[in-house]
Amino acid sequence: MAEPERVFREQVRAFNAADLEAFLATYASETELHGLVPDRVVRGHEQMRPLYEERFTQTPLHCEILALTVYGDRWVAAHEQVTSPAGTVVLVGVFEVVEGLIVRADMTGRVPL
């Protein structure tokens, strides 16, 4: 399994387990998350922690990978279905992985089911 895919799948496992520390451990400390919060870029663990602390208290919470493509040794594009108390959405995420950590994630196309 390519390194970007391994890191991405570990991130999904931690998300589904609501394991905040394991989830953050898959991201670089200065990562950038685009499209997670409307009109704002979430930067680094400091801004990620409160968002995911709250999210991980919600049940049900589950991410299912519908499709996954790895591009070279750096990129993962994932078609995901995420279920939360607010409902289920389908989205596309593109994750950039450098030296075993996600340095940037772009989420787009949130479509409610």
Image (cartoon, rainbow, N blue to C red):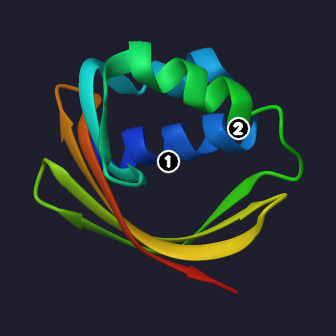
Q: Hey, which quadrant is residue 102 in on the image?
A: top left
Q: On screen, 19 above or below 105? A: above
Q: Is residue 54 visible?
A: yes
- Relative to the observer, which residue lies in front, 7 or 37? 37
- The label nearer to you, 2 versus 1, is 2
Residue drawn at (31%, 44%), measured in percent from left and top? 40
Three-letter amino acid code at the position of disc 1: Arg
Q: On screen, 75 above or below 113? A: above
36 relative position to 111: left or right: left
**Picture coordinates of residue 101, whole percent (x, y):** 28, 28
Q: On screen, 38 above or below 64? A: above
Q: Which residue is mark 1?
A: 9
Q: Secondary structure at mark 1?
A: helix
Q: On screen, 43 above or below 74? A: above
Three-letter amino acid code at the position of disc 2: Arg
**Picture coordinates of residue 82, whole percent (x, y):** 65, 64
**Picture coordinates of residue 83, whole percent (x, y):** 74, 64
